[in-house]
């Protein structure tokens, strides 16, 4: 088997400088006459004979990395043949790993929150591609010049549609002790919420300058996190806001079922600090007392594991973010009712879902900005109140419901953009009944259906031919239409509206 | 090059038709048939003709124990299988019988090996039902990937650099990389008589360029096949088996 050295040429790649020499692999700057982009080659350092751990880690990377796409992973250019020299060539992301960045800490609040949000976005992107990283730490992130965080080193990762070569290889827990999740210590390798724990530990570190569980060197030390809660961030620095402590400690819950259920939900809170539901976690200002620790120790010492989700995609689906665009105008009241029913049905099979209720105030394209006037303020508040009233019967706890009033001249565009920033999985909205005007001018819902990157469910009232007698009910029950006559009155029948999923 | 791997058709015309229709849209360059064209099913003649036509068009085919039993009455078989083979023998022309008798035991394509049962002793019709049973195949055969049938239950087994043989979990319909640091043995499920509690026809596609194997399932009109079996007076247990996939 070939060993890498500067100047080596293999499959057209020419090795340049050695950029990094780690325990398991070396990273080389490489060039190729066919490729113009900067690239790096990772070559595992395989000892003579059969070097199980290194080989399996590298095999896992070779399986997983070529399947990943998007800005949050390095693009794979080529892979080497194991019989000659195993390697993976990927694009080179300029800059050092976040390890450098983490050397100066604590960081100011705004920076902590922004970095945390970018990390969460990257991790959610991985999860959506069926991959749980399982070794998230500052060394394994690189930031693109455009700001996106890139996850690197998938040697311990798990793809839920591929065999887990590592599970059969090792019986000891794998990961990096300061960041490893409790269930990983109990040898679980199939819970995406393990990554959320690691994220929590990283944010804790950035905000406080300390590691939440210190730097245990042995498994016995790392195991303590099963019963010993970290010192609350606000006990270290009182300027850390309660909501950030809430987010950090929420992510660091011992039981995965009590953590954020997806990285997108964590990102949601990071980007909506005002709507973070503050619990006891946020108010904690000192370490647990000896008695609490003893109780938790007794409780946890015999725990063998926690229930893990069936698959990564099932978990993401359970913990989906559903955005509901509610039209609160009087003539749409019936439709808003149907919308509510549709959302309730959706929540039945998505027990951890979050619902983001939004309402759009349409402003004139050119003209006075309504929000700057008292009238505008009043409108905002009124809409918010109406939105809350609408959502009351959803019967969701505050931490799973948010309300946002958006405004702009192009409602569809605003809804689509908002859905993108929230990493929404599903948009639910109503459509006004068919009319010839709408057919020619297009409607908000049709624009959202055609342009949104997630699923969209459009709720519509059953159409009644104008002037035709309704066989199911007397025609005089139909509500008068206050708006232009092009809108047919909604049917008085109580049947649920058909849902069109796009 | 993309190879469609079909095995254990077992005289099931409906299943074979459905599989061929499914692979027609999948950019297949080569078809490999791992034997057992006849036996158990009601259409041995039609299926043999179909395979002969495919071979004529460039596909390759190896021999299975049921194909062998047509010309060789000494093959060991259970009573039901024996009954269908005896029934099939009368329905096959001399040309079809000669084709079945002339099939090779193995085929090799680059670093891939195709065989009906096991690679270590193809004529012994060994069932590779576990990692343990796959070990001799890896020891005897030098190919990087071995494709076999015979078991009627799809499975994927690999042998790592240290010689350890383990069975791997896979997701139906998802491409599985057969990473080159290991050697692989894929038991392709049966087209005409699946036995993994899923009555749908089973086959696999191997993409040589991407080095990925995909196991696929295709629904077919198994009630029609079962009805034909009953009409032909063949054992009811075989008809019931098609309906339940066991």
Image (cartoon, grey):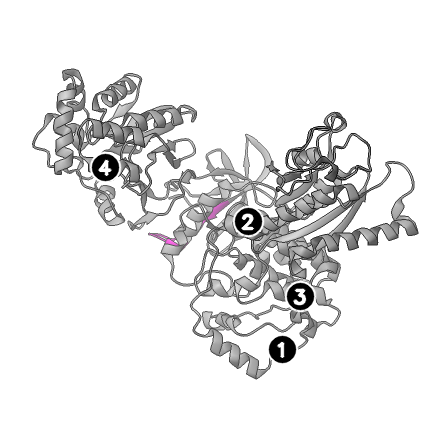
**Along the line of sight, which residue is nearer the eye, B99 or B22?**
B22
Q: Residue at x 74, y 72 (%)?
A: A238
- Rendered location of residue B229, percent (x, y): 22, 29
Regarding residue A320, the answer to whether it shows in the image is: no
Tell me the residue that label 3 is attached to: A246
**What residue is rendered at 54% in x and 58% in y?**
A193
Q: Quadrant of residue B144?
A: top left
What subunit carries mark 3? A
Nearer-N-terminus badge (1/2): 1
| Magenta range | A42-53
Q: Which residue is mark 4?
A: B150
The question of residue A51 being in magenta is answered with yes
Q: Which residue is mark 1?
A: A287
Q: Disc 3 on helix, strand or loop?
A: helix
Is tag 1's residue or tag 3's residue first in the polypeptide sequence?
Answer: 3
Q: Is residue B246 above or below residue A309?
A: above
Q: Chain of mark 1?
A: A
x 31%, y 32%: residue: B222
Residue located 35% across and 34% down the image: B204
Q: SS of the residue at dot 4?
A: loop
């Amino acid at each position: 088997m070939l060993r890498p050295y500067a100047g080596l040429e293999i499959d057209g790649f020419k090795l340049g400088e050695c950029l990094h020499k780690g325990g398991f692999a070396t990273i080389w700057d490489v060039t190729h006459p066919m490729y113009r982009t900067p690239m790096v080659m990772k070559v595992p350092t395989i000892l003579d004979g059969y070097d199980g751990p290194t080989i399996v880690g590298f095999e896992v990377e070779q399986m997983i990395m070529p399947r990943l796409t998007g800005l949050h992973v390095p693009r794979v250019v080529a892979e080497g043949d194991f019989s000659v020299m195993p390697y993976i060539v990927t694009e080179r992301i300029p800059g050092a790993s976040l390890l450098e960045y983490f050397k100066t800490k604590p960081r100011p609040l705004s920076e902590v929150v922004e970095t945390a949000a970018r990390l969460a976005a990257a991790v959610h992107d991985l999860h959506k591609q069926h991959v749980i990283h399982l070794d998230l730490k500052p060394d394994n992130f690189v930031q693109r010049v455009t700001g996106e965080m890139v996850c690197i080193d998938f040697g311990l990762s798990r793809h839920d549609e591929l065999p887990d070569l590592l599970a059969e290889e090792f019986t000891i827990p794998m990961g990096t002790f300061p960041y490893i999740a409790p269930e990983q210590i109990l040898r679980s390798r199939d819970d995406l919420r393990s990554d959320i724990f690691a994220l929590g530990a990283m944010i804790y570190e950035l905000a406080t300058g300390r590691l939440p569980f210190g730097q245990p060197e042995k498994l016995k030390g790392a195991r303590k996190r099963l019963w010993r809660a970290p010192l609350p961030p606000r006990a270290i620095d009182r300027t850390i806001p309660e909501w950030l402590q809430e987010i950090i400690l929420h992510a660091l819950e011992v039981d995965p079922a009590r953590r954020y259920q997806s990285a997108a939900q964590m990102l949601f809170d990071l980007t909506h600090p005002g709507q973070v539901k503050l619990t006891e976690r946020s108010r904690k200002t000192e370490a647990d007392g000896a008695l609490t620790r003893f109780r938790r120790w007794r409780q946890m010492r015999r725990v063998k594991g926690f229930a893990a989700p069936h698959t990564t995609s099932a978990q993401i689906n359970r913990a989906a973010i559903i955005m509901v665009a509610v039209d609160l105008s009087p003539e749409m009241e019936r439709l808003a009712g149907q919308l509510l029913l549709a959302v309730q049905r959706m929540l039945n099979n998505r027990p951890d879902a979050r619902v983001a209720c939004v309402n759009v105030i349409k402003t004139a394209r050119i003209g006075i900005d309504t929000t700057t006037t008292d009238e505008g303020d009043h409108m905002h508040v009124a809409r918010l109140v109406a939105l809350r009233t609408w959502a009351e019967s959803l019967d969701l706890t505050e931490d799973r419901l948010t309300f946002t009033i958006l405004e702009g001249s192009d409602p569809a565009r605003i809804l689509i953009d908002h859905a993108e920033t929230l990493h929404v999985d599903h948009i639910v909205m109503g459509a006004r009944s068919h009319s010839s005007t709408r057919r020619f001018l297009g409607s908000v819902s049709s624009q959202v259906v055609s342009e949104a990157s997630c699923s969209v469910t459009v709720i519509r009232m059953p159409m009644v031919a104008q002037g035709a007698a309704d066989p199911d009910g007397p025609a005089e029950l139909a509500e008068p239409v206050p708006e232009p006559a092009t809108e047919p009155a909604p049917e008085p029948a109580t049947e649920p509206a058909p849902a069109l999923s796009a | 090059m993309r190879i469609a791997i079909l095995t254990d058709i077992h005289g099931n015309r409906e299943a074979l038709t459905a599989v061929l229709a499914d692979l027609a849209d999948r950019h297949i360059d080569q078809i490999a048939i791992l034997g057992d064209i006849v036996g158990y099913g009601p259409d041995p003649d039609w299926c043999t003709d179909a395979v002969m036509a495919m071979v004529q068009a460039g596909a390759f085919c190896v021999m299975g124990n049921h194909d062998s039993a047509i010309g060789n009455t000494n093959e060991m078989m259970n009573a039901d299988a024996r009954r269908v083979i005896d029934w099939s023998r009368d329905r096959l022309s001399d040309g079809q019988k000669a084709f079945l008798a002339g099939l090779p035991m193995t085929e090799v394509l680059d670093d891939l090996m195709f065989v009906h049962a096991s690679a270590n002793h193809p004529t012994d019709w060994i069932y590779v039902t576990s990692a343990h049973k796959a070990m001799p195949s890896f020891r005897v055969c030098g190919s990087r990937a071995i494709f076999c049938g015979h078991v009627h239950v799809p499975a994927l087994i690999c042998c790592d650099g240290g010689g350890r043989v383990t069975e791997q979990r896979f997701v139906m319909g998802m491409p599985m990389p057969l990473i080159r640091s290991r050697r692989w043995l894929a038991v392709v499920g049966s087209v005409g008589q699946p036995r993994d509690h899923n009555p749908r026809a089973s086959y696999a596609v191997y993409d040589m360029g991407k080095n990925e194997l995909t196991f696929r399932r295709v629904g077919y009109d198994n009630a029609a096949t079962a009805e034909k079996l009953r009409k032909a007076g063949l054992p009811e247990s075989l008809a019931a088996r098609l309906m339940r996939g066991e």
